[in-house]
Amino acid sequence: MKLVAVTSCPTGIAHTYMAAEALENAAKGKGVEIKVETQGSIGVENELSEKDIAEAHAVIIAAGANVSKERFEGKPVLEISVSEAIKSPKEVIERALKLEKKNYMRKVEEIKQQRSEERTGIFKHLMTGVSFMLPLVVAGGIAIALSFIFGIEAFKEEGTLAAALMQIGGGSAFALMIPILSGYIAFSIADRPGLAPGLIGGSLAAQVGAGFLGGLIAGLIAGYTVDFLKKNIKLPKGLQGLKPILILPLLSSLFVGLLMIYVIGRPMKGLMDVMTAWLQSLSGTNALLFGAILGAMMAFDMGGPINKTAYTFAVGLLGANVFEPQAAVMAAGMTPPLGLALATVLYKNKFSQGEIEAGKAAWVMGISFITEGAIPFAASDPLRVIPSIMTGSAVAGALSMVFGASLRAPHGGIFVLPIPNAVDNLGGYVVAILAGTIVTALMVGLLKKNITGSVKVEARQKI
Amino acid sequence: MKITDMLNEKLMNLDLKANDKAGVINEMIDMLVYEGFVLSKKAILKAVMDREAIASTGVGMGIGIPHGKSNTVVKPSIVFGKSIKGIDFESLDEQPSYIFFLIAVPEDSANEHLKALSQLSRRLMNQEVREQLMKAESTEEVYKVFI
């Protein structure tokens, strides 16, 4: 275990050095390696090199004066006062050792959080619905895959475990998928009163065979209907309590229900049938192009609206028993962080020290299918990184489609691959992911420029 | 330059009379002024007190290291002082302080002096050094600690 520290104080005569000495002694006592840079009136002594920082588990900044933190990007930093370092150096060392390397992960979390806050309008409502639907799809898809362990037709034998698993997955989880999608889209638009008509509209969409497209439409109609009624129905004061409990759910449910049954249901079913049939018949060049487009969409904005569109489309198709696009989007969503992680290993001179560190976390993000893991890299050099990851993802998506790989679980990264029957043509699927990863890394190597010169060490303020 | 090169037995007082923080600082600065190492008592006193106002230099472990920079300092100097009874120096550990190093440097001090001072600060973090200073009964013994 190694730590690095910077000490600095207002006059830079005494405390800077006392703190340095205290930290060095305390670290020695604990058998921890430490390098302490002193920023005192003499100037910078024992300066930390990029290598020191890269090797360090954490950074301690003990300063009364301002110390620039740019050098330590991606590192856990413990900021304390100089006095604290002098007074209780052992505790400071212990606290620094306990810091975890989660800054990069946290950064990605923050980006995801920020994005979901930025979402507005229809897209936000759709994403709310999808997020509530996803757990059902995960649980249902994997339960179904497990039932196939006993044979593809085994569930037809009543009373068997295979039948039970199918009842859980197909009969219940997948049956709830579209109502929940629709219900929570409406909930997102109109709050609680939207839920009932949304669930009902979604249930009808499923019954008439309008699939997830029908569910999306039902949810939107239900939500906006309730919203409209809420604003426009005016009741005398004494009757107002009836509005949310009787009037809104009844009127909106009737409206959405009748619309689904008599007007929208049938054309939506037709559309779903055509699309499903087309997707199932996809092969050769068409499959390749389709996979490439889905893949490129996944990488384009790394978890943004375009990515979510492709992803939602694939998840929705699971309910229609079309599993190939799901495989393609997951492969394509994994390769951006994976490819960048590989690039940081292959092309060290094209990345900052912080990025090389972040590359390690990107591996984890990649195998977990967290496309957002590529964002910190793309943010610093979008015009070179985004085309690279789009190319790699297009390759992954295309190959996955061409190989006919299919996936029954909508999430989980490599962790769902070992589940029996979750993936069809597992070998081809793994090849697709690997190829996408390698192409991404090679593209990054081709497009990204070397970082020239050493990192600028900013002038340090001394009093 | 070594620490010992900056020590001066004329700037050592092993029996400070003051009863409080301001008194100790005053008493030690008076030695500097008396020996002619500082031209303006007012200026160096202000520099030292300004530094104390940011955060007390009573770093605990019985030690205080008031210090200041001023153009009126002729030569970088260390004043050593010891209080037998102990002084409330607004220490980090809230314990009385017994040993004081008052450091005065010109605004544009040469690095060699500053280096020696940084060495002094580091040495004071060593328990053995502190114990020897506590025991010291003559200027010679103080001097020896840093050889």
Image: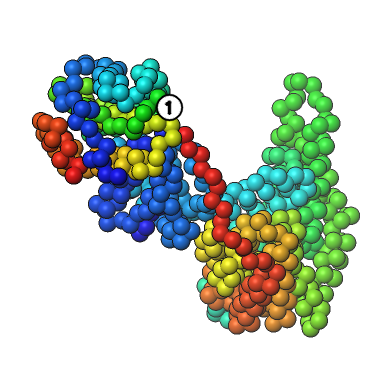
> Going 69% across and 73% down the picture, which residue do you hit?
A446
Q: In this view, does A204 lie above or below B82?
A: below
Q: Which of A167 and B8 is in front in this view?
A: B8
In this view, the residue in front, A445 or B17, is: B17
Residue A165 located left or right of residue A230: left
Regarding residue B49, the answer to whether it shows in the image is no
Q: Quadrant of residue A392?
A: bottom right
Look at the image and tell me whether residue A189 can be seen.
yes
- Indicate the position of residue B13 as horizontal and vertical percent values: 18, 25
Residue type marked 1: Asn
Q: Position of residue A404 (x, y in %)?
A: 70, 80
Q: Say few, some or many: other residues with alpha carbon within 10 Å of mark 1 (under 14 / 14 to 19 / 20 or more).
A: some
| Quarter occupied by residue A191 | top right
Q: Which residue is drawn at 51% across and 46% down?
A: A69
Residue under the image location 37 percent in, 32 percent down: B105
**Number of numbered markers:** 1
Instruction: Name the subunit of mark 1.
Output: B
Where is the N terminus of chain A found, in terms of image quarters? bottom left
Q: Which colour scheme is used?
A: rainbow
Location of residue A410 in the rendering, given as x and y in whole percent from the top left corner: 64, 65
In depth, the one of B31 and A333 nearer the eye is B31
Q: Is residue A257 left or right of residue A31?
A: right
Secondary structure beneath label 1: loop
- Residue A72 spot, x, y in % from top left: 50, 51
Which residue carries the number 1 mark? B71
Point 67% across, 55% down: residue: A379
Q: In this view, does A44 lie to the left or right of A268?
A: left
